[in-house]
Amino acid sequence: MANINRRYVLKERPRFQVPTAKCFRLEEEAAPEPGEGEFRIRTTWLGMDPNLFSKVKKVSDQARPIPIGAVMYGATVGRVDISNHPDFSVGDLVHGLWGWQDYFISNGAGIFSVDNDISRPSYCLGALGATGFGAYLVVNDVLAVKNGDTVFCSAATGALGQMVGQISHLKGGATYGSAGTDEKCRLAVSKLGYTDCFNYKSENFERMLSDRIDGGIDAMVVSAGGQTFDATFPLMAPGGRIAVCGLMALYSMTQLPVTPDRSFMILNEILLKRLTVKGSMVLDMLNTDRHVEFKREMKSWIAQGVVRPVEFITEGLENAPDALRAVFDGENIGKSVVHVSD
C-alpha cells in the first residue's frame, strides 16, 4: 500500500436523504512524495460525524459543502512516515482534517500532534475531540448542570450522548436518555452514567417518560429533535435550560412535514416556564483557553477511569461510506471511527 494512495472523492450529492455509498468514488493514485519543508502522513483513523452531512449537501448558508470530485472531508489521525520538515519526525502521531485517504502531504498547517499521555490516539476524534468538547461545554457552560438536576439527552448512546451521560453523572445530575433499541438503553444505564433510558420506538414511550420523570426536566440536550423532543419538551421544569446541539431528525427529511403550526404552543411554554433555549456550536470555542481546560480535565477523567469512552469501530478505508451511513441509521454505539492502518 506504500506505493498506492486510495482516496474517496465525492461523486454526487445525496439525491434524497442521507449519504450512501453511491455518493462516493474510490480512486487510486501513486502515493504522493513530500517536497522540501513538507512531510507525509499515513492515515490510521477516520472519524464519522453527523456534521459530515453538511459537507456533502448544502444545509444552510454557513455550511460549505465540498466540491464534486474533491476528497471527502473528515477528522483524521495518522502517523508521519516521511519527513522533510524540522518540526515533524518520522513516527510522530498527528491529527487534523485531511479526509478519507491513505496518505496526505502537509507543510504543517492545520496539523496537530497527538499528546503522548493519550491512551488511544482515536480518542482525538471523539472523547478528546470536538465531540467530547461539545458535550463538556453543554454540560458545564450552556446548561450548568449541578448536583440534583434532572437532565435529559436524546441519542444517549451516540458519540455526543455517551459523553453527556458520563459528564452529567460526574456533576451529580440524574440523567435520563432515549435510544432506538432496548440493548442501547441497557448500555446507557450500565456503562454511560444514565439513571434510566427509554426506547423511543416503544408504544408507551411518552407514558414511560412522564411516569419516570415526574419532577420535570431541569436541563435538556437536543441532538435529534423530532419525536423525542415532542415527548420531552412538555416535561420541562420551570426555569429549565435547553441546549440545541443538532437535529439529526432533519437529515432524513426530504421536505418539511405538513402539520399544524405548533410554534405558538412551544413559544408559550418557553414564556410561561421561563425556559432558556440556546444553540451550542463547538466550533465557536475551539483553540481557546476553555479548550485547553477541557483537554486537561478529560484526560484526567479517562486516566482515572471515571469516563470510559465507547467506540464503534469499522475496519478498512474501503468501508468508510458504510460507516457514515450507519451513523445516520443509528447503528453505532458510541463514537464511530474507521481503522485504516496501524
Image: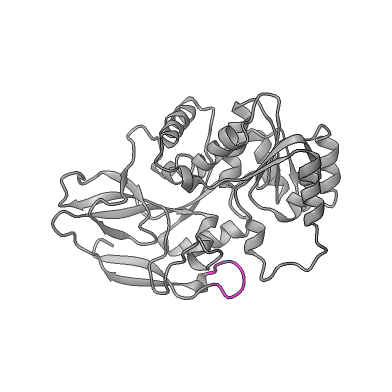
Magenta span includes 244: no
Q: Give the side of residue 263 with respect to residue 211, left or right.
A: left
Q: Is the magenta stretch mostly helix, strand or loop?
A: loop
Quarter of the figure with residue 152:
top right
Magenta span includes 18: yes
Q: Give the range drawn in magenta.
A: 14-20
Quarter of the figure with residue 264:
bottom right
| Foreground residue among 336 and 17 | 17
Relative image position of residue 128 (x, y in whole percent):
45, 39
Residue 31 in the image: above or below residue 216: below
| Foreground residue among 252 and 109 | 109
Residue extending farthest to the left is 36
Query: What's the residue at 53%, 67% (across, down)?
Result: 58
Query: What's the residue at 23%, 52% (across, down)?
Result: 81
Relative image position of residue 33 (x, y in whole percent):
19, 62
Quarter of the figure with residue 148:
top right
